[in-house]
Image (spheres, rainbow, N blue to C red):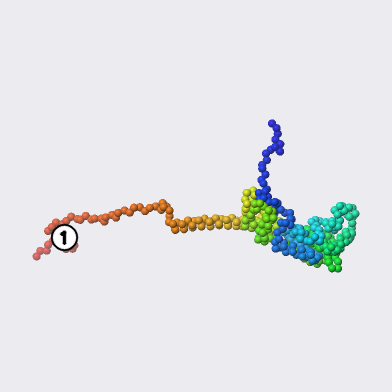
Amino acid sequence: MGLITTSDAPTAPESPSYEAFFGFDQRPFDLTPDPRFLYRSTSHDEAITQLVRAIRRREGFIVFTGDIGTGKTTVCRSLLTELGATTFTCLVLNPFVSVDELLRTVLVDFGVVSKEAARDAQFKAASTHELVGTLHEFLLSLQAVQGTAVLLIDEAQHLSPGVLEQIRVLSNLETGENRLLQIVLIGQLELLETLARHDLRQLSQRISLRASLVPLTPPEAEAYIAHRLGVAHGVNTPVFDKRAVAAVHAGSNGVPRLINLLCDRALAVAAEAESQTVTAAHVARAAGALNITIPPDVIRAGRGRRGLWIGLALLLMVAAAVAALVWLGPPEGWVDAPPPAQPDAPPPTIAPGPAEPAGIPPPPPPGSSPLPEFQ
């Protein structure tokens, strides 16, 4: 008898992914900051409009903040697609860099130095002054083509004070008419606290725009979910019912990243149950798996309302049945027939007493003497 290897052992069939169940081209709630999935809420639309206007007006220093997971990186990637062809951009995603590392990254992203030349020992040995000088020459050359340059630094709350001071120096690169470099600092709310420090007041005073993002409102969260489902092009696009949307917003507090996590897992739970509708119960299971708390009253509200509708429906059915009975009368056989009428009994008769003999006087009245009175 031969041995059964692991490859020969029977395996349980894998459950299909929810992408296959719903027919999605891609996951609608992936955490990758894809600009195609950006939902422009009131806050997001206002931030993008302000950023584009400030860059085109060459206002110089811009700060863009928002809480964790509100969509700052996605907004920045969408912003890059809205700038013209004559706008040269550099997006720095790693804030843990030195001054010289930042300058080398900027020169490579702007195309001043190729990636191959960046590995050259001479370039790596260049001083800060030489790197700034090379960048300045490039920025001046853009004037001939009416071009602009934009430097965007993500997670800027992690920048060291020395790098922030160098960024302030870069903002001084300008001609008599225009600023040569637009700088956008993107970060969490802690960035505002950093810029409020006394030793960075020169940098803070140069900020011409402070844009920010806020979490989504309940109606915006519902529109956000529908937007991402539509972009994913599902063949059997699921539907999040009202209570499911309320549960998602309650568990995420309107933060898009948490909405994505909850909806992604809730879709998997619904697909496992072969349900085309995502309910609050599915969202509750998803939240439990993600260690996200949803207020119990939100889940109970959905169940209570469902019970109310069921009770109301039963009450209407009973009322309709009673009305039918009153209008049409009870069906034959539902009410017992009355017993047949009995003939009236004759009145009782009293037998006459024995007749008194003739010639015998009646007895005297009470109180009279029974003896005859003698004269």
- Residue at x-position 78% and y-position 58%: 154
Where residue 307 appears, x then y in whole percent?
A: 56, 55
Helix, strand or loop status at disc 1 = loop
At x 88% / y 60%, what residue is drawn? 134
Q: Residue furthest right?
A: 122
Residue 208 seen from this side: yes
With 151 as the anchor, is 261 left or right in this view? Answer: left
Residue 99 image offset from top left, x and y in percent: 85, 58
Q: Residue flagged by tag 1: what amino acid is it?
A: Pro
Task: Tell me where residue 116 appears, x and y as whole percent.
Answer: 86, 52
Q: Quadrant of the N terminus?
A: top right
Of all residues shown, which one is farthest toward the top? 1
- Residue under label 1, please give it: 363
The relative height of residue 132 versus residue 1 in the rendered view (above or below) is: below
Q: Position of residue 171 (x, y in %)?
A: 83, 64
Give the residue at x 89% y 56%: 126
Q: Residue at x 21, y 55 (%)?
A: 351
Q: Which quadrant would residue 260 be assigned to in this image?
A: bottom right
**Number of on-image labels:** 1
Quarter the C terminus occupies: bottom left
337 to 50, vertically: above or below:
above
| Residue 169 visible | no
Q: Nearer the viewer, residue 99 or 139?
A: 139
- Quarter of the image where one finds residue 222: bottom right
Residue farthest to the left, as pictured: 375
Q: Mark 1: give few (<14), some (14-19) or many (20+) Cα within 10 Å.
A: few
